[in-house]
């Protein structure tokens, strides 16, 4: 049995946030530092991979340094360094990986490779009251929409995933065509608060019977076509439908599918808990919908706080802790993977 605790530094540069966090035993967060690149990518209406890599290069040293200072520790207090090696943008991932390799090499601290999605699933363990195993995890972010049956640390069974756009990507694209800018999730949610979600019946892609997969590209196209017509008609006469109604109706159709599929996975497995993770899990309407669905079935739903839903290094430290406990350390030949199904070995 382990008696002493382990302090792990987690680093994530998988997309457009440079982040680092220090966590004890995969549970207690000593620090979580995130440098957002929103201002850099905003004028382009989405993440520009090359700009993301350059920004990570610029910010990785101060972000890691700040995470150690805020945690009140020095580099040699660390028992391990965990770094995201995928899935994500290759150029962005390489910055975090090579920085982590350098730190590990010069300080002789064990390095471990983390799957970004495992980080999202385990972000709930950074909270005081995590769920018991087994549970259903719905990871909804800009790059992923997946349902896992989680039996324990390192034991994740994929039950369904998006076949095209991720839920967050649909929010971002609809925000872009609505002129609400990037990033879109927060803007759509804000706009939707003043709208009527029953106003327009956008399609819900439930797929074939029994399928737990998702598809959001048809919905995105439906909103784009509706918006085009709405803009043309608006020129002719005053009409009742507002942009807020469109945002609310779009948001509700995403929510309906997410709630239906996650609840189906729950009843199919018989587990008593659902965990929501990833950037879209910040959405208050999504939280509300899951709270009432869970109450109706007498089960519990868990959400990490918003700063642990969006990308952060602390969740990578939590996942890295369990990998190191299992003896899964990496050497200097470690490489990144743009596509990286959970459970498959790192390169
Ligand atoms: O987990 P995350 O920070 O990065 C990825 O791993 O992709 O998620 C970012 C995504 C973006 O698509 C963003 O629009 C979405 O999460 N998002 C939201 C909200 N806040 C962030 N979507 C809906 N409602 C929100 N409040
Ligand atoms: Zn993420």
Image: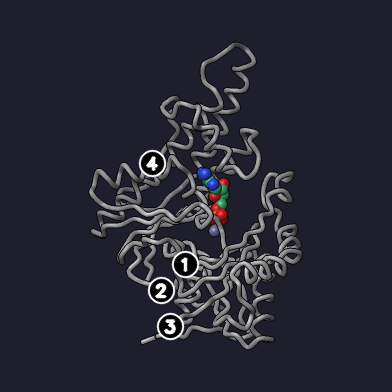
All told, the count of numbered labels is: 4
- Neighbor class of circle 4 (other Cα within 10 Å; few <14, some 14-19, many 20+) is few
First-in-chain label (3 vs 1): 1
* Secondary structure beneath label 3: loop
Can you give x and y, in whole percent of width and height, for residue 218 in the image?
Answer: 49, 41
Choose mark 4 or mark 2, whichever is in front: 4
Gap between marks 3 and 4, in whole Å?
37 Å
Q: Which residue is mark 1?
A: 118
Q: In this view of the protein, which residue sits in the foreground, 13 or 211?
A: 13
Q: Are marks 2 and 3 in contact (CB under 8 Å)?
A: yes
Find the distance from the CA under tag 4 to the CA under tag 2: 29 Å
Horizontally, is 192 left or right of 130 in the view? right
Q: Position of residue 103 (x, y in %)?
A: 67, 80
- First of labels 4, 1 by sequence position: 1
Residue found farthest to the front: 72
Q: Which residue is mark 4?
A: 288
Can you say whether 69 is above or below 234 in the image?
Answer: below
Q: Decide: marks 2, 1 in contact (CB < 8 A)?
A: yes
- Is residue 199 left or right of 7 when viewed as pictured? left
Q: Secondary structure at mark 1?
A: helix
42 and 66: which one is in front? 66
């Amino acid at each position: 049995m382990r008696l002493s605790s382990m302090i792990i530094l987690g680093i994530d540069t998988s997309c457009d946030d440079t982040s680092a966090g220090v966590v004890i035993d995969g549970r207690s967060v000593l620090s979580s530092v995130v440098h957002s690149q929103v201002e850099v990518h905003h004028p382009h209406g989405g993440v520009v991979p090359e700009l993301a890599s350059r920004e990570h290069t610029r910010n990785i040293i101060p972000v890691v340094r700040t995470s150690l200072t805020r945690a009140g520790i020095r580099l040699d207090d660390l028992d391990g360094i965990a770094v995201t090696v995928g899935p994500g943008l290759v150029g962005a991932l390489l910055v975090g990986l090579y920085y982590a390799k350098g730190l590990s090499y010069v300080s002789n601290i064990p390095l471990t490779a983390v799957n970004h999605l495992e980080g999202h699933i385990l972000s709930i363990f950074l909270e005081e009251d995590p769920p018991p195993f087994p549970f259903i995890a719905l990871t909804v972010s800009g790059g992923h929409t997946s349902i896992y049956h989680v039996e324990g640390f390192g034991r994740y069974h994929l039950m369904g995933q998006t076949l095209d756009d991720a839920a967050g990507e649909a929010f971002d694209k609809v925000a872009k065509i609505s002129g609400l800018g990037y990033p879109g999730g927060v803007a759509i949610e804000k706009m939707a608060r003043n709208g009527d979600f029953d106003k327009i019946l956008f399609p819900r892609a439930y797929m074939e019977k029994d399928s737990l997969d998702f598809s959001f590209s048809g919905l995105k196209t439906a909103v784009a076509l509706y918006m085009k017509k709405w803009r043309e008609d608006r020129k002719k006469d005053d009409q009742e439908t507002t942009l807020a109604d469109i945002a609310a109706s779009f948001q509700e159709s995403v929510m309906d599918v997410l709630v239906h599929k996650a609840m189906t996975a729950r009843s199919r497995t018989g587990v008593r808990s659902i965990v929501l993770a990833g950037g879209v899990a910040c959405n208050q309407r999504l939280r509300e919908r899951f709270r009432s669905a869970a109450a109706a079935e007498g089960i519990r739903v868990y959400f990490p706080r918003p700063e642990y839903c969006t990308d952060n290094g602390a969740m990578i430290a939590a996942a890295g802790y369990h990998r190191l406990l299992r003896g899964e350390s990496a050497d200097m030949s470690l490489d990144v993977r743009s596509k990286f199904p959970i459970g498959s070995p790192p390169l």
